[in-house]
Amino acid sequence: MTSKVLDAFLSPQLATLREQGLYNEIDALEGPNGASIQIHGRELINLSSNNYLGFANDARLKEKAIEATKTFGVGAGAVRTINGTMSIHDELEKKIAAFKHTEAAIAFQSGFNCNMGAISAVMTKKDAIISDELNHASIIDGCRLSGAKIIRARHQDMEHLRELAKAATESGEYEKVMYICDGVFSMDGDVAKLPEIVEIAEEFGLITYVDDAHGSGVMGAGAGTVKHFGLSDKIDFQIGTLSKAIGVVGGYVAGSQKLIDWLKVRARPFLFSTSLTPSSAAACIEAFDIMENSPETIERLWENGRYLKHGLKELGFDIGHSETPITPCLIGDENLTQQFSRRLLEEGVYAKAIVFPTVPRGTGRVRNMPTAAHTREMLDEVLAVYAKVGKELGVI
Ligand SMILES: Cc1ncc(COP(=O)(O)O)c(C=O)c1O
């Protein structure tokens, strides 16, 4: 049932969203996520996943997940602090720390709740957080939850960051000041300017927090954006997800032993929510092993990204300033963006429209996420469809 009061809230809001083309209809996949997917019985080329390395349906990961289910069961049974930790979770955390070149790591059930837990475990209302204006929603929510003063920094504007860091630290109002940003910004594919960020952080004594959800498995031979810049010993918090390049589910913080010790007693999603399933942990371990031993998978991802970008640019599309395989195709108007994406779908390409509130109003885009699993033929087919739809809708 929907009470009168709730209906009076929901009905007009939903109607407005639909009128403005801002309501996101969610499609059901009738099989696994991969370079192609099946929706309503149709096979579509998939450019909408974060399954960068094609691990989400990889036979090797599935095998490990099945083995772990047989050994440990389907669920962890309780939160780790109450019922003990399964050895497979410890093994995963050791693997992550080694891969990230940090002393230790802690795994969470998702990247989203990792940010909710990690930020609020360290920052309080006596502190300030300088946050890039295009940070992911989970960072924004984690900052809000902490109660710290949130100071918005203009996107990737290092002069602005310097001014804000100086003002915040010299004001004497805050016990600690943190700078927080994505390692790779997922809507535009640009990379955080970590060398300059570290320099500013060192000058003003900032805590540094990099959420590398889209950089892990992609940048730095898979180890992420921090490793890419050779700054593993300069960033306090390295966040990652196990749900994107790793292909499974979960999130983590990699950092010093002291930080991880603290998060194990203060990060609330770790303390009050049941841990990853054993099968997830086992599949993640296998994904890290493959990344270490098969660098060609990551190279294929980059090659596919370069190929798609080059092709779209040649056709005359505005692909922004991505520095990673993430390939946005900027269209602007929300309705036109939705229409463009619908036409792609009719032509067999699944690339979703990303519109406000995920990105600022008037910057609607179709975001293309090539993966290591896409073939050259698939990408050529995508380019042919883009050419057709682009001309038809007057975008090129
Ligand atoms: C920067 C960033 N952090 C965190 C998350 C959340 O990750 P998860 O899907 O593992 O909860 C995302 C997902 O889109 C992200 O882009």
Image (tube, helix red, strand yellow):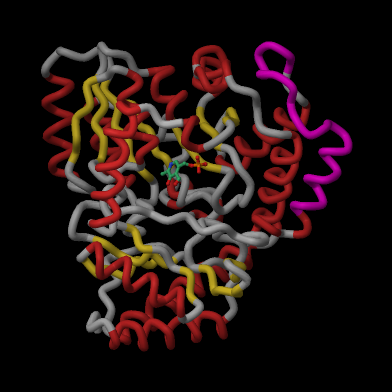
Q: Position of residue 347 (x, y in %)?
A: 46, 81
Residue 169 vs residue 379, the one in the foreground:
379
What secondary structure is the magenta-colored segment mainly?
Answer: helix
Point out the stretch of residues depicted in magenta.
Answer: 61-84
Instruction: State the residue in front, 241 or 1.
Output: 1
Q: Position of residue 296 (x, y in %)?
A: 63, 67
Q: Residue at x 11, y 34 (%)?
A: 163
On screen, residue 43 versus residue 312, left or right, reads right
Splitting the image into 4 quarters, where does residue 191 fall?
Answer: bottom left
Please state the total of marks drawn on the protein image: 0
**Residue reaching furthest right?**
70
Residue that appears at 28% across and 78% down:
317
Q: Is 254 displayed left or right of 9 in the figure?
A: right
Q: Is residue 371 above or below residue 102?
A: below
Q: Which of 179 and 36 lies nearest the eye of the viewer?
A: 36
Residue 333 point in image, percent of width and height: 20, 65
Task: Locate the C terminus and report the quarter of the image it occupies.
Answer: bottom left
Residue 388 painted magenta: no
Residue drawn 65% across the image and 57% down it: 55
Q: Where is 216 relative to 377, above or below? A: above
Relative to 31, residue 243 above or below:
above
Q: Quadrant of residue 129?
A: top left
Viewed as shown, does residue 175 lie left or right of 30? Answer: left
The verdict on residue 65 being magenta is yes
**Which residue is found at the position 38% from the left and 33% from the top?**
209
Q: Relative to residue 110, is residue 247 depicted above or below?
A: below
Provide residue 226's location: percent of width, then percent of height.
Answer: 44, 45
State the image quarter where residue 60 is shown.
bottom right
